[in-house]
Image (tube, helix red, strand yellow):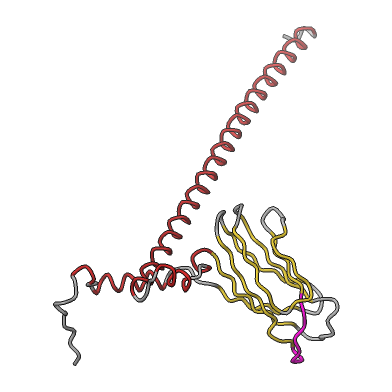
Amino acid sequence: MLEMKRDSNVPKAMMISPSLFFILLWALSTAPVGDAIWLNLPKTGTKCVSEEIHSNVVVLADYVVVSVDDGQTAPVAVKVTSPYGNDLHHRENVTYGRFAFTTEEAGNYLACFWSDNHTSATGEIVVNIDWKTGIAAKDWESVARKEKLEGVELELRKLEGAVEAIHENLLYLKSREAEMRSTSETTNARVAWFSIMSLGTCIVVSGLQVWYLKRFFQKKKLI
C-alpha cells in the first residue's frame, strides 16, 4: 500500500490540500471547451450551425472536408454572419479553412456550409468543424511560453481564465435578465393603462346609452 509523505523542504504555500485539488480538477473538467461538429452536406442545399454569444468574445473555428460517400474530397463554400447580418467570413471552392473574430454584438452567430456547384461529387460531403469560443479559443501554449508557466501554475492560470469567463457570462445573463424585466414591466404598465382606458370608455358609452334611452322615452312620454 502506497503512503504519501510530506516533504519538509516543500514550502507550505505550495502544498495543496486534497479537497482543493479535487475542486480544481472539477472546475477544469467543467471549463468551456471547443465543440467538434460534423455536418453531412447534401448535393444541393445548405446546412448551418449557430451559437448565441455575447459581445467581446473571441471565436475561433477550423473546418475541413473529411470525405464524400464515394471517397473523394469535394470543395465547399462557407459563410459566417453576425446577428445583424454582417459577413465575417466568406470562402468558396475550399476544402479547409479557419475563421477567427471578436464579437461586437450579442446574439446568434451563424456559419453556413453548402456544396460548391463546380464539384463532381455525387454523395454527401462530410465536414468537420472545430468551434471554440472564449477561454477555449485562447492559445495556452503561447501564454505558457510568454509567462514561463508550467505544470500546476499553467493549470491554475487556465482555471483563472475559466472563472473569469464564467463571471462574465453571469454578468451578461444578469444584464439580459434586467432588460427582460424592464421590458416586462413596461408591457405590464401599458396593459394596465389600456385596461383602464377600456374600462373608462365602457363606462362613458354606457352612461351615454342610458342618457339617450331616458331622453327617448321622455319624448315618447313613456316615463
Residue in the foreground of this view, choosing between 137 and 208: 137
Q: Quadrant of the N terminus?
A: bottom left
Q: Residue at x 70, y 64 (%)?
A: 89
Q: Which residues are magenta?
A: 69-76
Q: Residue at point 42% right, 70% down? A: 30
In this view, the residue in front, 111 or 101, is: 101
Name the residue rendered at 53%, 68% in the picture: 137
Rendered view: 130 above or below 203:
below
**Residue pushed farthest left?**
8
| Magenta residues, dominant SS class | loop
Task: Classify residue 41 by image quadrant.
Answer: bottom right
Rendered location of residue 57, percent (x, y): 55, 58
Q: Position of residue 95 (x, y in %)?
A: 73, 79
In the rendered view of the protein, which quadrant contains the C terminus? top right
Q: Is residue 214 left or right of residue 104?
A: right
Q: Is residue 46 highlighted in magenta? A: no
Q: Is residue 75 magenta?
A: yes
- Position of residue 99 relative to residue 3, above or below, is above
User: x, y (%) of residue 71?
Assistant: 74, 92
Q: Nearer the viewer, residue 211 or 130?
A: 130
To which quarter of the image does residue 213 belong?
top right
Q: Is residue 33 left or right of residue 1?
A: right
